[in-house]
Amino acid sequence: MTGIVDGTEIRVRRPAAGRTDRDTFVPGENKQNAVRTMAVTDGEGRVLWCSPAGPASCADITHARQSGPVGLLADGPAVEILAGAGYQGLGAQTGGRVVTPPHRTFKKNAPDWYEEIHARQRKAHSSRRIRVEHGTSLT
């Protein structure tokens, strides 16, 4: 079985003035008040699991570690979970069940053949994940 994980931000009203955690609702990405949630879908785009909402300033990988799917994947059945670049590092914690796009090994002056292979691998990975990207962008 193949699953797909993606995080999304949901805009919310700004918390009241004087609230101590007011800044945690503002993520670095778009500077709007929001909460972050994460969804796991199957290959057809049907939602299998959705995390509780958390502060939007929390990174995708941190939200995944705190909300529980990492423990379930490490001890659960053998499944492949396709994830975005924000989840790089979870593969080691889940026994290789979380698959992320390939890293860049060359920072500068990469050979042309490497750039072509790297772009092809990233496109193949994103093509397999596109259903969850479309599903979470509707919010």
Image (cartoon, rainbow, N blue to C red):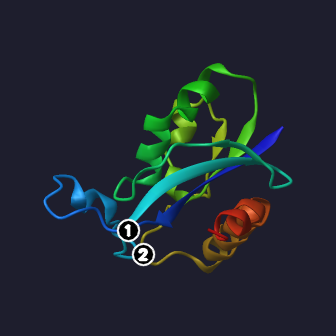
User: Hey, what amino acid is under mark 1?
Assistant: Arg
Of 68 and 103, nearer the camera is 68
Most extreme residue toward the left is: 18
Q: x, y percentage for residue 78? A: 75, 27
> Mark on residue 108?
2
Q: Residues within 10 Å of mark 2 (few under 14, many from 20)?
A: few
**The C terminus lies in quadrant:** bottom right
Of 52 and 100, nearer the camera is 52
Residue 79 lies, with reference to residue 51, above or below; the image says above
Residue 88 lies, with reference to residue 80, above or below; the image says below
User: Hey, what amino acid is under mark 2?
Assistant: Lys
> Mark on residue 99?
none
Write the residue at 63% across / 35% down: 96
Question: 106 left or right of 129?
Answer: left
Question: 39 left or right of 135?
Answer: left
Write the residue at 72% across / 60% down: 132
Write the residue at 66% across / 75% down: 113
Residue tagged 1 = 13
Q: CA distance from mark 1 to mark 2?
A: 43 Å
Write the residue at 33% across / 69% down: 28
- Indicate the quadrant where residue 128 lies: bottom right
Q: x, y percentage for residue 95? A: 61, 29
Residues at discs 1 and 2 in contact (Cβ within 8 Å): no
**The N terminus lies in quadrant:** top right
